[in-house]
Amino acid sequence: MNSMRPPSVQLKKLDHGQDMDLPFYATPGSAGMDLMAAITEPVALKPRERTLIPCGISLAIPQGYEAQIRPRSGLAFKQGLTVLNTPGTIDSDYRGEIKVILINLGQEVVTIDRGMRVAQMIIAPYTQVDLKEVSEFREDLLETTRSKDGFGSTGLFAIK
């Protein structure tokens, strides 16, 4: 069990989200908090159509953390509704409204109603690195078992 204190993330409800529930963990073991649609009227999303769904909140994420926006597996499996830029990243210096880009990959129209749980949000640490341009890799970084065999080189079909 993790004994570290979780980071504190400030949340501000926006005017059109005042009556909405806060994002929440559905179970004690949930990694992601459910995000709800803060829309004023239902949105009918046709197959292969995408839309931007506001969540009615903004966050002050601490430096060194990001929010990742991911699909809800039940919506993806049952209705073909998924997050287009998965995972969407919300940087620690963004203070605007949290919005979710949804796409309907199913074969039927999906109606999104106010308060519907449309995505999940995970708060996770990240590391920024210092890129160093080199003309050759160091000897200890030169060869790996995968090396430079291309996309999919660890599976049956390699793309070169």
Image: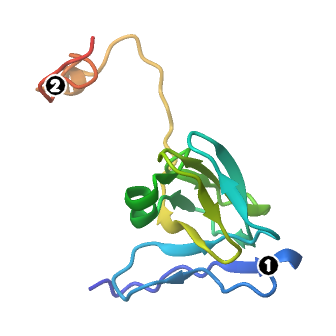
Horizontal and vertical percent for residue 63? 62, 63
Q: Is residue 59 above or below residue 22?
A: above
In the image, 89 versus 7, the foreground residue is 89
Horizontal and vertical percent for residue 130? 51, 38
Answer with left or right where residue 124 lies relative to residue 88. Answer: left
Q: Residue furthest front?
A: 108
Horizontal and vertical percent for residue 40? 82, 70
Mark seen at residue 75:
none
Mark seen at residue 17:
1
Residue at 48% of width from left, 58% of height from top? Answer: 71
Q: Is residue 35 above or below residue 126?
A: below
Quarter of the image where one finds residue 47:
top right
Answer with left or right where residue 144 lies relative to residue 32. Answer: left
Residue at 33% of width from left, 83% of height from top? Answer: 29
Q: Are marks 2 and 1 in contact (CB under 8 Å)?
A: no
SS under mark 2: loop
Answer few, some or many: residues within 10 Å of disc 2's Cα (few below 14, many 20 plus, some between 14 and 19): few
Label whose residue precedes the other's in the sequence (2 or 1):
1
Residue located beneath label 2 in the image: 146
Front disc: 2 or 1: 1
**Where's the N terminus, which quadrant?**
bottom left
Residue at 49% of width from left, 58% of height from top? Answer: 70
In the image, 140 versus 88, the foreground residue is 88
